[in-house]
Image (spheres, helix red, strand yellow):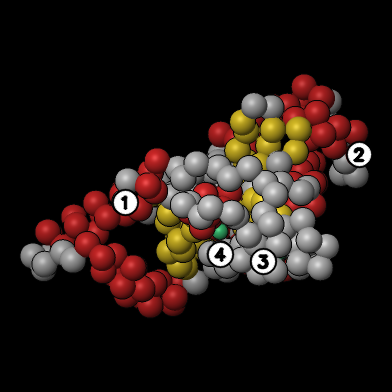
Amino acid sequence: MMSNSLVDEREASTLYKHCCDIHKVPCVPDKLDDFIDTINAKLQLMFMQIRKGMSEVNGRQYYALVNMAETDITRMSSDYADNELELFRKTMDLIVSSENGKISSTDALNIADSLMTKRLKKSEAEQVLNRLVQDKWLNEKRGEFSLSTKCIIEMEPYIRRMYEDQVKLCHICHNIAFQSQICDSPTCGIKIHNPCVARYFKGRVEPRCPACDEFWPHEIPEVPRSISRR
Ligand SMILES: [Zn+2]
Ligand SMILES: [Zn+2]
C-alpha cells in the first residue's frame, strides 16, 4: 500500500488473500472491508488510514493509504515549487467550481498568467500540469483536466474544508461529486456521479430525480463494464 498510491478492489482482494495465506487463516472474500477496518484501527496511532473511494470515471472502488495528519496541498511542497503548487491549487479551484468537474487545458494554462508567487511561462505550466497527471493528482482526457481518484480520496478532508460552500455530495453514494449530472429543477439541484447515474437509472423506463421526482433530462450513460459484470 505504501509503494502503490492507489490499488483497485481486485488488487486489494489479492493482498487480503495473500495475508490470509501467509497466516493460514480462512479468507472470506466479502470480509475485505472488515479486514481493512482492523488494519485501520492499528494505523490510527500513526495518523494513517486506508480509505476507500470510487473512481468518478469508471465507478470502480479504489483504496489508498492516506496520511491523515497531512491532507493539505502543502504536503506536496517537497515535490513542487510554490508557484507550481499555486497552479495546482487554482486548477483545483476551477475544477471544483465547474459544473461537471472538468476544465479545458486552455483554462488551466491561462492560470499561469495570474500566479501571485512567480509567473510561469505557458510551456512551463504545461510541464507542471503533465507532472501533476503523472503523479496522479490530475486526470487528463481529451484536453480536459479533472481531479484524479487518488486526489479525491487523499485530499477529501482538505477539499471539504476549503470548498465547503461549493462541494456537493452524490445523492446516491454520498461521496463528494465532481464529474456528475445535476438535477435541473432550481429548487432541487442534487448531483449524481456519472457511474451512479448509470447504475441508478438502469432499467427504469422514465428517469426521474430520486430527490424531487422531476424528469431527469440528461443522457443516461451506460453502466461501466467493470461494474455490470459483478
Ligand atoms: Zn455517487
Ligand atoms: Zn431533483
When asked about the image quadrant of residue 141, the answer is top right
Structural crowding at the residue carrying mark 3, measured as other residues with C-alpha within 10 Å and reported as few (<14), some (14–19) or many (≥20): few
Kindly tell me whether mark 4's CB lies below 8 Å from ligand 1. yes
Q: CA distance from mark 4 to mark 1?
A: 18 Å
Q: Which residue is mark 4?
A: 172
When asked about the image quadrant of residue 121, the answer is top right
Label disc, if present, on residue 114 of the rendered structure: 2
Tell which tag, 4 or 2, sits nearer the viewer: 4
Amino acid type, label 4: Ile
Mark 3 or mark 1, earlier in chain: 3
Tell which tag, 3 or 2, sits nearer the viewer: 3
Q: Which residue is mark 3?
A: 213
Amino acid type, label 1: Arg
Residue at position x 88%, y 41% from top? 115
Residue at position x 67%, y 54% from top? 216
Residue 163 in the image, given as x and y percentages of width and height: 76, 62
Mark 4 or mark 2, earlier in chain: 2
Q: Nearer the viewer, residue 77 or 197?
A: 197
Mark 2 or mark 1, earlier in chain: 2
Q: CA distance from mark 3 to mark 4?
A: 14 Å
Mark 1 element type: loop
Amino acid type, label 3: Asp
Residue 45 visible in image? yes
Residue 2 in the image, given as x and y percentages of width and height: 40, 53
Does the residue at mark 2 contact the one at mark 1 (Cβ under 8 Å)? no
Q: CA distance from mark 4 to mark 2?
A: 37 Å
Structural crowding at the residue carrying mark 4, measured as other residues with C-alpha within 10 Å and reported as few (<14), some (14–19) or many (≥20): some
- 124 versus 43 height, above or below: above
Kindly tell me whether mark 3's CB lies below 8 Å from ligand 2. yes
